[in-house]
Image (tube, helix red, strand yellow):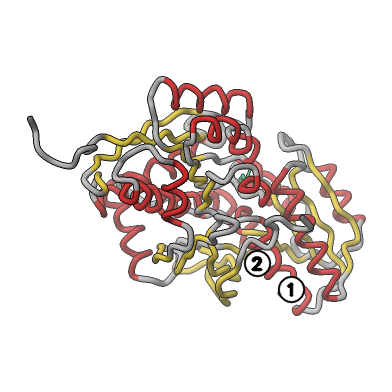
Amino acid sequence: MATGPAWAATVKVGVIGPFSGPFATAGQTFKQAVEVYQAMHGDSAGGNKIEFVYKDLDQANPAQSKALAQELIVKEKVQYLAGFFFTPDALAVAPLMDEAKVPCVIFNAATSAITEKSPLYVRTSFTLWQATVPLAQHVYKTGVRKVVTAVSDYGPGIDGEAAFKTTFEKAGGQVVDSIRMPLKSTDFAPFMQRIRDSGAEAIYAFLPAGPTTLAFTKAFADNGLKDKIKFFGPGDITQEPDLPALGDAAVGITTAFHYSRAHDSDLNRTFVAKHKEKFGNADTVTFTSVGAYDGTHLIYRMVEATGGKPDGAKAVEAVKGLSWESPRGPLTLDPDSRTVVQNIYLRVTERVNGALQNTEKETFAAQPDYGYKLGK
Ligand code: PHB
């Protein structure tokens, strides 16, 4: 008989994300960051080997998300679900999580209400409320009084719109028009006309990071709006992998966000260097990378706390209130919202030594998810 811990086993983690299609870079960042975490911290926790299984969900598709999660739980026998770029995909798995008592570690999906749907969700990304409340306060402080909001018409966009309007109007500003764009829009010309006609001094925009933000931000510059209307938003709109293609269209945009690849810390420099070492470059490193890196950290801690045994409730209980250092800065998992409390940084997209980056200018320390159970 082999000796060792009674339950020493391989713990499987099922990661659902876009590994093909227009948002494939996001899936790639999940996988790379998990591999970087394992390179830095080993592939076992509490004597249990941790194995990641990846499932491709190329777009927001809740029915397929549920089917993939079912397959991971029943056939692959995963003890944890993780990943989830799009909100509807994360929401769709709540009934399965509760039934099978499988925790889900959200690497990205950012609508506040998700973690209200099951006590077994934990989130290491951010929420739109978290990034937008300090941003709206900043926009008011710059002297801007009239803003148009433009968001993708689904969970995180609607949260961003509400967070901006509530905060900005409470300060004394006015949202003069609220534009909602279909999630699958690729032609933004009609919206540019409406933005121009709104008479706003500034825009607040949210779209899911990737080809969507790229096309919107390019259209904004190409339609001559950049010199007339100040551009603000959460950092999805200037995420690092898109900066080379955005070029001058991104310069001067002010964003509030939890992660910049240019964040000045030793751990972030190591994090970026590890990507270069393992994958030849760090061109994809962005906010979804730290979402996955810190999500992996939580999975390791949960596996340790449960001795590798399947006990979803105990696993989640063990990480409530946990604090640790991330490449983005200090994190604490809020015991109620189960979303990380973190610094939100005010950044400006600048050219530094020829390359574009999001330079952090100001820190709004320890921001909670202002949207959790709002009004409930
Ligand atoms: C989401 O669907 O929650 C989502 C997707 C992409 C982002 C942010 C949030 O960049």
User: In front: 252, or 164?
Assistant: 164
Which residue is found at the position 76% from the left and 60% from the top?
A: 163
Crowd band around label 2 with a 10 angstrom C-alpha radius: few (<14), some (14–19), many (20+): many
Which residue is found at the position 60% from the left and 71% from the top?
A: 346
Q: Is 283 on the left-hand or right-hand side of 303?
A: right
Which residue is found at the position 35% from the left and 36% from the top?
A: 52
User: In front: 178, or 318?
Assistant: 318
Q: Give x and y (percent) for residue 191.
A: 83, 46
| Marks 1 and 2, how far apart at CA | 13 Å
Q: Give x and y (percent) for residue 308.
A: 30, 41
Q: Is residue 6 above or below residue 335?
A: above
User: In front: 228, or 213?
Assistant: 213
- The amino acid type, in three-letter code, at marker 1 is Gln
User: In front: 159, or 23?
Assistant: 159
Would you name the residue on which mark 2 appears? 254
* Quarter in which the C terminus is drawn: bottom right
- Mark carried by residue 137: 1
Q: Is residue 368 above or below residue 276?
A: below
Q: Is residue 298 above or below residue 360?
A: above
Which residue is found at the position 87% from the left and 56% from the top?
A: 196
Toward the left, the furthest residue is: 1
Crowd band around label 1 with a 10 angstrom C-alpha radius: few (<14), some (14–19), many (20+): some
Q: Is residue 167 above or below residue 118?
A: below
Residue 218 visible (yes or no): no
- The amino acid type, in three-letter code, at marker 2 is Thr
Element type at mark 2: strand
User: Total number of numbered labels?
Assistant: 2
- Mark carried by residue 227: none
